[in-house]
Amino acid sequence: MSKNSENNTPRIGEEQIQLLERLCTACSVSGDEGEVRAIVMEQVSPSASELKVDALGNVLVARRGEGAERLRVMLAAHMDEVGFMLTHDDGEGLFRFETVGGLDERQLVGKPVWIGRDHINGVIGAKPIHLTTPDERKRAISLDALRIDVGPGGDGQVNVGDRATFATPFARLGPSLRAKALDNRLGVATLIELVKHAPPEIDLLAAFTVQEEVGLRGARVAAYAFNPDLAIAIDSTPALDLPAWDGAEVTQYNTRLGAGPAIYVADRATLSDPRLVRHLVETAKSLGLRYQFRQPGGGGTDAGAIHQARVGIPSISVSVPGRYAHTAAGLARLSDWSDTLALLHGSLARLTPQLLAVER
Amino acid sequence: MTELLPFIKSLIAAPGLSGYEQPVRILIEEAWRPLVTELHTSRLGSLQALKRGQGTDPRPSILLAAHMDAIGLMVTAVVDDHLRLTSVGGVDARVLPGQLVIVHGREDLPGVIVQPPPERLPEEARAGPVEIQYLLADTGLPHEQLQSLVRPGDLVSFAQQPLELKGETLAGHSLDNRASVAALTHCLQELQKRSHSWDVWAVATVQEEVTLGGALTSAYQLRPQLAVAIDVTFGKGPGTPDHKAFPLGKGPTLGWGPNIHPGLHRSFKALADRLEVPYNVEVMPRHSGTDAYSLQVAAEGIPTMVVSIPLRYMHTPVEVVALKDVSRAGRLLAEFIVQLDDEFMNNLAID
């Protein structure tokens, strides 16, 4: 690592946490990422060699390095989050709605929501328990029976087609963070820091992508446009490290909170490039950083679309583990986030064309 | 004069689960102290405030009861980084996953209630709503720290921030029954500028959601001639059958049924008609589901009335009330008190 990079190592401090809070509090449901896009542009503009918003709304930022023989490295973090769209005005401030992205309908009942970019308040109510039968309480309340309620006389303030998200304020809980949309504002915040502190050894091509939650759509065109030598998707992956009801040993946890950045070997969409797996692991070891392998299995990240762009792009994903993704309140560990940032920064600074000179 | 909206917001921000009402009682005491002649706390924890009337001794008294306790949860076990839970009062487990809470351990710990992934549950519990016994709370603390700060029996209260909605409505947890505490407070404020001959006992009762024991013991201790329970009722809205619910913003309801003295009901109704205060009659064919159930049978029995404020999504953390209904309920109670005279009890007929 050059001296230059050493001095330029990014850290997670108060400023970064406050930026994450702004990012998490923004409402950016897939297809309507404008609020996060505006924050990203404001943050990365001063460091960008080139910056553009493409046809889908991706923010594409290039930051050129200095040395000879620089790899062109794409880093992708999706800006969108799961949420709702209002689909019918029932009158009296009540709206039918549908979900956007993978949401468990059992997570919706009894939650406050923010609607549109003005964050108009609403709630998703439920029938009073007093009027339910024991049988009824054994069945989940279907989406069809739920309404977003903005209050009597609220029609006209919000409209069919508006997006909504859970209205969850950001909070620090001891060593952890609790917020909505940590998937993937953690990735966005990490990528912002990497743009600001880009190692000069590479050309950094940052894609803040749209529509990941509805089919990895932004990443696909971003990868085509950048045509990079290799790519890393930065995301947040579920930590399912919860106890079993009967105390049985838990062996399928995907990732664990507090165990460091999650390196992907394989998920349903991508078989990571083994050269990149080795590179990340070696970097973590030499920097003395905690890391874990995300348990191979289901799920996917932007890498699923990126690795198949053009003639193929060597790709991998690194995630900050997070509990309760796609619910009103996720939970992540601050140390995992800062270790993820350190691992990525260290890995980028160590990248040379030799890495890809050996065949996969 | 306390402003209604910020006052209700402060009331619902304070914990006060059934049996552990002290935090909210302190706030109510502060608000009531300048409005009443004297106040004290009962042996079970109810706040009993006397506003003395101007009539000659011995004066009759009317007791106004609004329960201040709230539903919530309790810790049953600490497991790894998580807590297992049970309910305090009537909680529908289907509203719990993803709710923000405060765990009242050795210190207050913010947290969230979570639904474990299916593979952590017994097979028969994986589809459909997850029962409370299988839900967990997460405070973000690692096991060692959690273990030292939380133990079984610690309370867990809802922590959803109040949200102002359109049409001067407010959404939040515990509006059942802090909205009624606010109505009772509004009544006491109205009485400041009026003269009344009867004594008024304003009582913020405890344990309504579980035992109704607060109202019963206060009524026994204070022996009023009349009693009124102020509570919330089902507001018209999604999920609630129209024939069992009342529109928001169209006034309080006047209860009618076995828990209610027919003469007292008629008297309230006549007054509301005369003052042109909007109201609806709410039929309560059996248990009124309010403190009236115990007020009525305290000591040798007390003529009792129920005045209710319509509220949407009862017993969820996003209950909704119209502020107008709260102030109207308070005003109606004040007007009722002002017109009570020496003859009222003599004229009160059951048939």
Image (spheres, coloured by chain):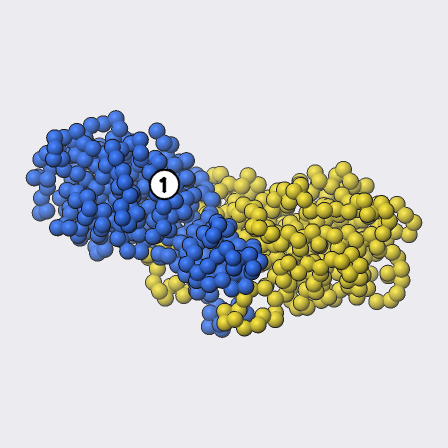
Residue drawn at x 61%, y 54% as measured from the top left? A332
Q: Nearer the viewer, residue B6 or B105?
A: B105
**Mark 1 lies on residue:** B26
Q: Colour of chain B?
A: blue
Q: How many C-alpha atoms fall within 10 Å of the one at disc 1: few (<14), some, or many (≥20)?
A: few
Image coordinates of residue B56 in percent, x first then y, are: 12, 30
Residue at x-position 60% and y-position 52%: A175
Q: Residue at x 18, y 51 (%)?
A: B298
Asked whether, in this view, residue B9 is left or right of residue B339, the answer is right
Query: How many marks overall?
Result: 1
Residue A19 seen in this snapshot: no
Amino acid carrying mark 1 in the image: Ile
Lateral position of residue B145 relative to residue B18, left or right: right
Q: Percent from the top left, x then y, of residue A76?
A: 73, 52
Q: Is residue A296 shown above or below B337?
A: below
Which element carries disc 1, helix, strand or loop?
Answer: helix
Res B133 visible:
yes
- Relative image position of residue B124 (x, y in whole percent): 46, 72
Q: Position of residue B249 (x, y in %)?
A: 34, 39
Chain identity of mark 1: B
Front residue (pair B47, A261): B47
Q: On the rendered structure, is B322 left or right of A203?
A: left
Q: Residue furthest top?
A: B193
Q: Residue at x 47, y 65 (%)?
A: B134
Residue extending furthest left?
A: B346
Q: Is residue B265 left or right of residue A44?
A: left
Task: Pick the quarter of the image with the N terminus of chain B.
Answer: top left
Chain A, chosen colour in render: yellow
Q: Quadrant of residue A254?
A: bottom right
